[in-house]
Image (cartoon, grey):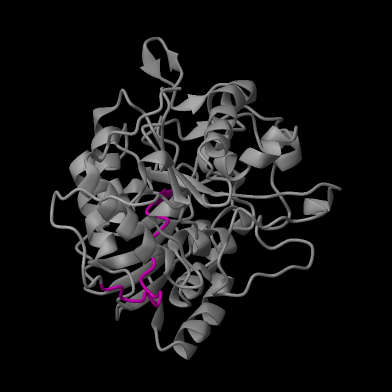
Amino acid sequence: MRVGTNLMRGRAAALWTLLAVLAWALAARAGGGGENMLLIVNPEDENAVRIAQEYQRLRGIPDANIIFITPLKGFGNMFTAVPTEAQWKSSYVDPILNAIQARGLSNQVDYIATLGQPYAYGPTPAYYGADQRQSSGYGLANLYQFAAGFTSTNLVHDALPLYDVNGYTLGANDAISSTRVYTNWSGINANAQFFMGGQLGWSGFGGNSAAQIISNLQYTLSGDGMKPVGTVYLMTNSDIRTTTRSSQFIGVTNQLAARGITGIIEPGNTPVNKTNVLGATVGYAGMVLPNGSTYLPGSWGDNLTSNGSQFDTMSQTKSTMFIASGAAGTSGTVTEPYADSARFPNAMIHVFSADGSTLGEAYYKASQSPDLLLFTGDMLAQPFADIPTVTFTSGPSDGGIVSGSEKTCRR
């Protein structure tokens, strides 16, 4: 593992990073900012480094929150999926947790996002077919569980959401924090803590260009706290990929209406030539995206299909095409999930976002069994959050030298 701290340079840059951290720390009750995000970056991937530099600038991410890890290679190329669980633990679980502890981030980091890293690890014991990868996002969410000696056998296909267990139910606008401890987790007599894990972007095979990802991250930030006026499209057709979740739609449109947001149950495969897509829940194997629709900043779009985030095959539309369309976040499975609604986000994700949660929080509240499911995009996006305005009436000049005693600022 190589650790880098040079994405931002200079005293003035360090000061403005601190000011950004202070501003984001005051964000909504459900939310989070750059100080709560840990980035895992491949230093040998030029695209990953470029995206990380811009995202750090956009979100005010401290240098200490960036870890460089060079992925395992096979035949000279990066593994898109880490071959074994033991290699996942040695290459990611141990280095990341060690860095979190060494840098004093244990009470600060809630989100972990990757750039230029494998999208899955495995194999795990076969309970659905032969190829039993689990997503890297799920592996990151369970770092503490791996460190405590759990295996994928213990963690596979949880019957309950990570963040809604043992009678404790998160409110729609409650924040998710990795410091919360769950007891007797998932029926096992053990304590559990979870991160929110995913990938910030995928610029490899089947993904987006670095320029596309950077533009999308800039566009997403412009929508934070703006409470955009748009429509959530819940698409229906005869495909089992749609009918698997269609029973959720009426309840979601009613919940959205109670919040002054339009939700439409519309026939078709995906919203086409719409100017106001606030969200899209769809189910169709071979969509063409982008397709003339404008996805608003902070929007969510996902597709119930088998290979949405399996990037070593071009079979079926990739989840990254929602990023190309302008959505702030999306998800897809890394291997065959079958038509199981629990393996995909509940359409309530749109309601959780409307209540002020970040997309990362909304996604984990809405995903009952996210073991095969990979979040892609900006987990910090929060279009409906109430973000206070912080004004500094005085300060050093640009490039000035700051002096004084050092204090530690935590959320």
Examine the rendering and report whether any part of residue 300 can be seen: no
Residue 43: quarter of image: top left
Q: Nearer the viewer, residue 144 or 128?
A: 144
Is 24 left, or right, of 352 in this rendering?
left
Q: Position of residue 220 (x, y in %)?
A: 28, 61
Tell me if residue 265 is in the magenta stretch. Answer: no
Examine the rendering and report whether any part of residue 94 can be seen: yes
In this view, 215 is above or below 381: above
In this view, 333 is above or below 174: above
Is 89 left, or right, of 190 in this rendering?
left
Tell me if residue 383 is in the magenta stretch. Answer: yes
Identify the residue shown where x is 25% and y is 70%. 392
Q: Position of residue 359 (x, y in %)?
A: 44, 62
Magenta highlight: main SS: loop
Q: Position of residue 24 (x, y in %)?
A: 38, 63
Residue 311: quarter of image: top left
Q: Position of residue 106 (x, y in %)?
A: 58, 46
- Residue projecting furthest to the front: 404
Q: Nearer the viewer, residue 362 or 181?
A: 181
In this view, 28 is above or below 405: below
Identify the residue shown where x is 48% and y is 69%. 357
- Residue projecting furthest to the right: 189
The span picked out in magenta is: 376-391
Identify the residue shown where x is 33% and y is 52%. 404
